[in-house]
Amino acid sequence: MKNYKVLFISQEITPYLPENELSVVGRNLPQVIQEKGCKIRTFMPRYGLVNERRNQLHEVIRLSGMNLIIEDTDHPLIIKVASIQSARMQVYFIDNEDYFHRKLVLKDKNGKSCKDNDERAIFFARGVMETVKKLRWSPDIVHCMGWFTGLVPLYLKKAYKDDPLFSNSKVVYSIYNDTFTQNLNKDIKEKIKVEGINNDDLSVLKSAGFNDINKLAINYSDGVIEGSSNISSELLDFVEEKKIPLLNKQGNDENVDSYSEFYTKILNGDPDGSDK
């Protein structure tokens, strides 16, 4: 898959956040895909727990300055970047004072989900898309990791479908057991809507719970990866029902060849992309 362009959008990446199943893949997979000869871009949210000084984040002025409107309120989009020198890899951070300056990730100190996680996810998804547009970078594969990235497939396939930068992009979505128990805001459907997205596109969002958000992502993806073991049967059944190619869990040591082969199958429109 040499010379492909792969856009990685991750909920978490180490060393900016503590190591876990998702953050480790978010760190290592882009590096090894790049080492295979691909061009990459990597994005994550600039949570308040990310130490800007230690990790040497700095604002990219030429990319910042846009406002994103959510529920009639303007939210400035700030783009920051840092380098992982050992990987020769840059990471772009989506930042906003309203959503990402609290000293937490997606849950508070009591383990409860942030009440505005719906708007934070919307802002992150749209922020990534607008930043990639400013970069004038056309990805072949857009790989989203974690539920917080779950709105990206929808926006790419509906709101940005006529943008020539994304017209040929394929979406791969990794499901993780990064579950939450409190449903997202009941008004999330109205908040998500922009030109190109209507109620029918959001029909799977019945309760805005964890499974619903994942189903929405799956619905607009060209391939799905089991990022964790023991993914709920409801979600796996939904993947099968939609006849979307599935790459099963690859074990603790990520099998890079399996990922790159899966990308190639998706790009080639292989109907038998499943690795069951």
Image (spheres, rainbow, N blue to C red):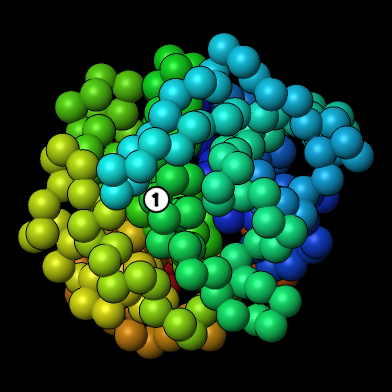
Q: Is residue 265 visible?
A: no
Tell me the residue that label 1 is attached to: 122
Q: Name the residue furthest top.
A: 62
The count of marks equals 1
Q: Residue at x 69, y 24 (%)?
A: 59
Q: Name the residue furthest right.
A: 54
Residue 31: where, in percent of width, then height?
71, 38
Q: Residue at x 24, y 71 (%)?
A: 205
Q: Name the residue furthest front.
A: 73
Residue in front for this viewpoint, 270 or 55 = 55
Q: Residue at x 35, y 42 (%)?
A: 73
As displayed, is residue 165 above or below residue 96? above
Residue 142: where, in percent of width, then height?
43, 40
Q: Residues within 10 Å of mark 1 (few under 14, many from 20)?
A: many
Helix or strand or loop: what does disc 1 sit on? helix
Q: Residue at x 48, y 63 (%)?
A: 117
Horizontal side of residue 198 vs 253, given as left or right:
left
Q: Quadrant of the C terminus?
A: bottom left
Residue 32: where, in percent of width, then height?
70, 40
Residue in front for this viewpoint, 186 or 161 = 186
Horizontal side of residue 262 vs 14, given as left or right:
left
Horizontal side of residue 200 vs 105, given as left or right:
left
Dot 1 amino acid type: Ile
Q: Is residue 205 visible?
A: yes
Residue 168: where, in percent of width, then height?
28, 30
Residue in front for this viewpoint, 92 or 248 = 92
As displayed, is residue 111 above or below residue 223? below
